[in-house]
Amino acid sequence: MSSRLRLRYGDTDVTAWWGSLVLFRYVYLSEAPQLESPRPYFHPVRTLANDVVTIYRPHDHVWHRGVALSLPHVDKENFWGGPTFRDGGYVQLPNDGAMLHESFDDIAEKNDVVRFDERLRWVTESGENPITERRRVAATVWPSDAAWLLAFETTLANDSDADIVIGSPTTEGRPDAGYGGLFWRGPRSFTGGTVITGGGTGGDELMGVRAPWLAFAGRHDDRGGASTLVFRDGTHNFSYPSQWFVRSTPFAAVCPAPFFDTKHTFVAGESLTLRYDIIIADGEAHPVRCAALAAHAAAVDLIGQQYPRA
């Protein structure tokens, strides 16, 4: 297989190829109904061994989309999809907003790195536009580590004339439901998989843990192999080290959750930047290997390297 990494730009998606292997498909124009909060997402995402490590529109939560930036509580608006947790329960409200693609400022391949720079606007179900976003995505392959790196950065701008309070179902009263942020939903076969931190391995009891990185290892149907995803919190994120929303059952999910149990006031006219790395590795990695992969991503600083600060 050729080691060349490249991008293909289509009418609705951007696809990253490594030789003949599709590493990921990034759908920037979603056909999802309003109730599912249309927004860009990564799916499928594959390992170098060609194993798929995401799921799209699972029947239990049809608004889950592979890997996607999703926020359930943006003041009274929902940019997650489905019902909103309010007053002790979930209720379907006319508040499912959309993250709409505006343009690509840059799509490039250089020095074994592919990257793109996207502009989006967040539109509420009622048609208001409180937030605009600049999104930066980059990827590179580490063949000697049997892994590759997906780097993601978002800069949100509060373009409204009022402060916006961002929270989660936990800040609204539901324990251990602090989801909201860059959310990954794993394949069905990853259910019951292993959660990994620098302190060792575990499962659902690690919900809400604070850590600079967190990993999830699961097995695949058919061939029976394993894969590990290592999620790294950006050191300059306001919540670093963030709490993690993580589930091994009833399904596999990971989300670095900056608004897990504390509301954040997003001041009118200001911006908020969050940066994350996801390392997609072949095999069931142990804590030492996961820590090394996270350290490698930090040293590479793929977004900062390709987008030097002014």
Image (tube, rainbow, N blue to C red):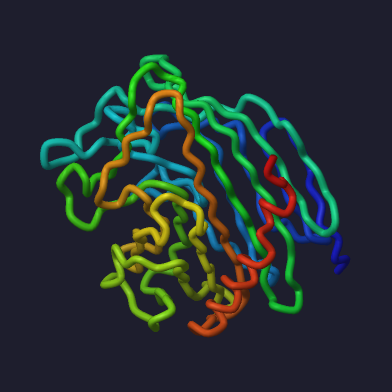
Would residue 84 be visible to someone looking at this image? Answer: yes
Relative image position of residue 82 (x, y in whole percent): 32, 36
Q: Residue at x 30, y 33 (%)?
A: 165
Q: Residue at x 41, y 14 (%)?
A: 127
Q: Is residue 130 left or right of residue 174?
A: right
Q: Quadrant of the N terminus?
A: bottom right
Viewer-nearest residue: 126 or 276:
276
Could you tell me how many numbered marks the image carries? Answer: 0
Q: Residue at x 62, y 30 (%)?
A: 119
In the orientation shown, which residue stands out farthest toward the front?
310
Q: Is residue 303 left or right of residue 18?
A: left
Would residue 189 be visible to someone looking at this image? Answer: no
Q: Quadrant of the C terminus?
A: top right
Viewer-nearest residue: 144 or 160:
160
Picture quadrant where residue 100 is located: top right
Q: Residue at x 47, y 38 (%)?
A: 272
